[in-house]
Amino acid sequence: ALILQELLVLAFLSFSSFFLLIDSSQGQFPIVQNMTVTEGGIVNLTCRVEHNDNTSLQWSNPAQQTLFFGDKKALRDNRIELVRATSQELTISISEVTLADEGMYTCSLFTMPVKTAKAFLTVLGMPKKPEINGLTKPVMEGDQITLTCVTSGSKPAADVRWFKNEKEVKGAKEVNASGKTFTVKSSLQLQVNRHDDGVAYTCRVDHMALTATHEETTQVLEVHYAPYVEIKHSIPAPLEGQYLKLECVPHGNPSPDPVLWTKDGGELPDLDRVIVEGRELTFMALNKTDNGTYRCEATNHLGTSHAEYKLVVKDAPTTSSPSTTSPAPTLPDTTGPLDSKHLNSAVTGNRDPNALPGPPDHALIGGIVAVVVFATLCLIIVLGRYLARHKGTYLTNEAKGADDAPDADTAIINADGNHAHAEEKKEYFI
Ligand SMILES: *[C@@H]1O[C@H](CO)[C@@H](O)[C@H](O)[C@H]1NC(C)=O
Ligand SMILES: *[C@@H]1O[C@H](CO)[C@@H](O)[C@H](O)[C@H]1NC(C)=O
Ligand SMILES: *[C@@H]1O[C@H](CO)[C@@H](O)[C@H](O)[C@H]1NC(C)=O
Ligand SMILES: *[C@@H]1O[C@H](CO)[C@@H](O)[C@H](O)[C@H]1NC(C)=O
Ligand SMILES: *[C@@H]1O[C@H](CO)[C@@H](O)[C@H](O)[C@H]1NC(C)=O
Ligand SMILES: *[C@@H]1O[C@H](CO)[C@@H](O)[C@H](O)[C@H]1NC(C)=O
């Protein structure tokens, strides 16, 4: 029974392999591939038969019209051409592809019965360059605008994105089909402010027909706004005698007219007090009479704006003794009879913003001098006492022979001779 079973299995196996062999030797069947092409492009449709006995091949279009029967052209269409016709292959090409060419193409092998294979040709619609609408130039600050970006002709629908200076911002997308293609719109609502001036909005279209690239359109916003003003000052807490520069910086679009400086609502003081050069107002040396409110005003056709700077000139710091009231440094007092020219330069020199303030200088020098004098005095006292105590020894060591000795050893040797005499001398003194 076992042998019988084995025989049966063997028989079955050989039978099936025989059947397969028959099938592959007689296996005449066409092989095709689905294709994708962008409209306007060119595509090859290839039909292959592995083992063919000169049986004819044919390509027909979605409308069931025969395009090529073997190497014979069947349809009058200049865009359709023969590429290769052998017993194993029939390849045709379609150029200037349109969306209407999309569909199922059939390759037929005229065996008995006829064998067919179907290839779907997908035609991609190329999106048109995006168009940005809704932007007026210039835009007024505070206006609400809606930018729309539209691209038509894409198939499948294109991807539309917005970028504000390279950074993506979310828009509202809307897709409409028109025939076989799609129109894609993305809207962006903006409340425009001055910071949008000069900002670039880019609409970018990505699509599979745009391999390794994309289409984009950019619009730069121009925002008009009334000016605003800021005043920059060269030093934070101005002191009498210091140099001070105020700079008026107007911002506005269109650019404001030249700025206007006023003091306490009136004219600026005389030119010898203050120098005005365009946006800059300069005090060479501040005086307490300069304090007040300085106003800078900028105007464009959209409006006027101003900024104010309240100047309160503080006392220049006084000398080492911190007397609060005396604004003048003690320099004139101590120098006594000094001609006015000299005094003036000394004072202005003292008030040069780049120079260190005078009083700390004096205090420092005074301190150093005191320390040096004290140290010298101490040294003198100590030395004096030391000398008085050890006069004998001192003298002995400074022996005559040591004086002209070239080095220490020689000095000691030279001094040795006088040693006894020295002892004697020391004893005598003490
Ligand atoms: C079509 O086939 C021909 C011949 O093989 C080749 O030269 C050509 O580049 C092909 N065209 C396309 C679009 O693949
Ligand atoms: C195919 O046809 C050619 C001539 O047209 C002939 O020489 C060849 O033997 C044929 N092949 C087969 C397998 O019939
Ligand atoms: C070819 O395209 C058709 C229609 O889109 C689809 O049904 C079929 O599965 C595709 N065949 C291959 C091999 O991708
Ligand atoms: C899409 O269709 C709607 C309604 O038909 C229309 O209001 C809208 O403007 C269309 N959008 C585009 C981008 O064509
Ligand atoms: C400040 O101005 C007044 C009046 O012009 C003048 O008398 C005074 O000397 C000035 N003070 C200084 C420190 O320059
Ligand atoms: C200058 O400041 C003093 C106090 O420091 C004040 O009394 C005076 O009114 C100020 N002058 C101006 C013009 O503001």
Image: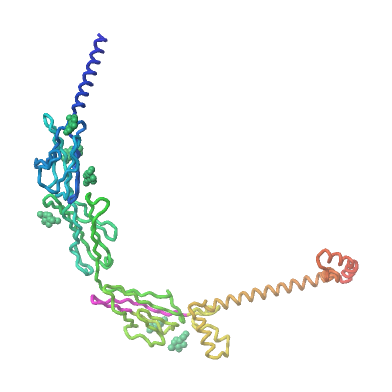
x and y, in percent, of residue 300 in the image: 26, 77
Q: On the image, which quarter does residue 310 sit in?
A: bottom left
Q: Main secondary structure of the magenta part?
A: strand
Quarter in which the N terminus is drawn: top left
Residue 9 relative to residue 382: left or right? left
User: Which color mode does the image show?
Assistant: rainbow
Decide which of 328, 235 is in the foreground and name it.
235
Quarter in which the C terminus is drawn: bottom right
Q: Is residue 340 above or below residue 143?
A: below
x and y, in percent, of residue 71 in the image: 15, 40
Magenta stretch, residue numbers: 296-315
Residue 78 relative to residue 242: left or right? left
Q: Residue at the location (31% across, 83% down)?
A: 265
Decide which of 148, 104 is in the foreground and name it.
104
Decide which of 79, 380 is in the foreground and name it.
79
Decide which of 233, 423 is in the foreground and name it.
233
